[in-house]
Image (tube, rainbow, N blue to C red):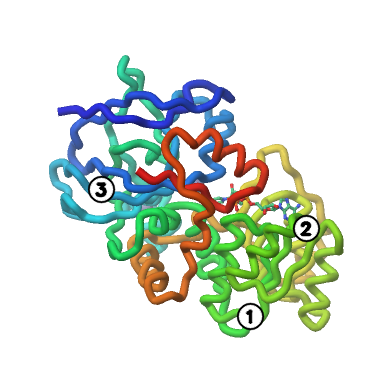
Amino acid sequence: MPQKVRGVVALEKGAPVSIETIIIPDPGPGEVVVKIAACGVCHTDLHYREGAINDQFPFLLGHEAAGHVELVGEGVTEVAVGDYVILNWRAVCGTCRACLRGRPWYCFSTHNAHQSMTLEDGTPLSPALGIGAFADKTLVAAGQCTKVDPAATPQVAGLLGCGVMAGLGAALNTGNVSRGDSVAVIGCGGVGDAAIAGARLAGAGRIIAVDVDDRKLEWAKEFGATHTINSRERNAVEAIQELTDGNGADVVIDAVGRPETYEQAFYARDLAGTVVLVGVPSPDMRLELPLIDFFGRGGSLKSSWYGDCLPSRDFPMLIDLYLQGRLPLDKFVSEEIGLDDVEAAFEKMHHGDVLRSVVVL
Ligand SMILES: NC(=O)c1ccc[n+]([C@@H]2O[C@H](COP(=O)([O-])OP(=O)(O)OC[C@H]3O[C@@H](n4cnc5c(N)ncnc54)[C@H](O)[C@@H]3O)[C@@H](O)[C@H]2O)c1
Ligand SMILES: [Zn+2]
Ligand SMILES: [Zn+2]
């Protein structure tokens, strides 16, 4: 029997979101229905609402979520009814060219549910990142569910579903931060602070946080920043060099994604160092730098999609580290809100007042 539940929907471009009745079909082959327990508010949800991702309105928003599997479709073996899961947007296919080469974290053909959830009048909904979890329940592909230890609350566990995983993975997977490395992180929102936490976990010696907002720099210290730089007041490149014996950092992570922050990251790394771009630029942005500097400085320039994570490998491991007290996931939760408060949470995010607002159901 299809179910009627509440969901936060962006009906048209730029308009405030509204709570709508949505219809969830019974799960088909390979699909599951998940009862959502908590879902974080991410910048990408706002991008969807603004029409910046694509124009396939209406969108069912929300994608940083944890909950319980309620129904499973035919042939589902990955999870069972009652399992406590984090939802992911990287259900790897196992057969694309990346998967076949043993690099599934780049999977080019990830799975989503085949059927659509709809409004009451039958209009199909586009779920944000194939998830749509600002809702009592959602329909996803079984591979989008990763089972984790239920000792971690859903408010905390759900964060690994997007931004926090992106930041942790930018340091741990893409940047491959190692013991004793010096690391600089530009932009200390949820993603940047997660990169700082990842660098600390990996044993970085010096962790330099850069932001334009002093409040953010204070919070960054709680995640492991050993030094902070307000780049409105100081030249970030010179300040990072000063803190690294004049050399620059081994790994610099750009968690903003603008030409000026990328240029800072490029020049603030040591020779043969690594730059990781995890902030998402807009399509109009351009970068112009002397080509000789690319050659002369060596090293590697990388981008990090979803922290190059493999949910089945990384989510349970990171939850275990959290439960051991080695990863302060609860510090990301600035406030707990209801489904009605998503629009207000976008406003707070826009003003930089929160790291994460989390909808609790
Ligand atoms: N690569 C991925 O898979 C992935 C996943 C999730 C989010 N993201 C992206 O990561 C970025 C950060 O996300 P967030 O949730 O942390 O956002 P956020 O808005 O919470 O944080 C951005 C931070 O950057 C700071 N900042 C802005 N301009 C700056 C500048 N010129 N120099 C230094 N600091 C500056 C802000 O003060 C803020 O603290 C976004 O672009 C988001 O889309 C990427
Ligand atoms: Zn694949
Ligand atoms: Zn997100």
Q: How far apart are marks 1 and 3 (CA)?
A: 38 Å
Identify residue for label 2.
263
Q: What element carries label 2?
A: helix
Q: In which quarter of the image is residue 229?
A: bottom right
Residue hosting label 3:
142
Residue type, numbered disc 2: Glu
Side (left or right) of 157 relative to 166:
left
The amino acid beneath tag 3 is Ala
Residue sitting nearer the eye, 267 or 36: 36
The local crowd at label 3, few if under 14, some if 14 to 19, many if 20 or more residues have their Cα within 10 Å, is many
Q: Which amino acid does label 1 sit on?
A: Asp
User: Which numbered dot is residue 181?
Assistant: 1
Mark 2 Cβ and ligand 1 under 8 Å apart: no
Image quarter where the N terminus lies is: top left
**Earlier-in-chain disc, 1 versus 3:** 3
What secondary structure is found at the residue carrying circle 3? helix
Name the quadrant containing residue 113.
top left
- Which residue is painted at 81% across and 51% down in the image? 288
Q: Position of residue 291 (x, y in %)?
A: 80, 59
Q: Which residue is drawn at 30% across and 18% down?
A: 120
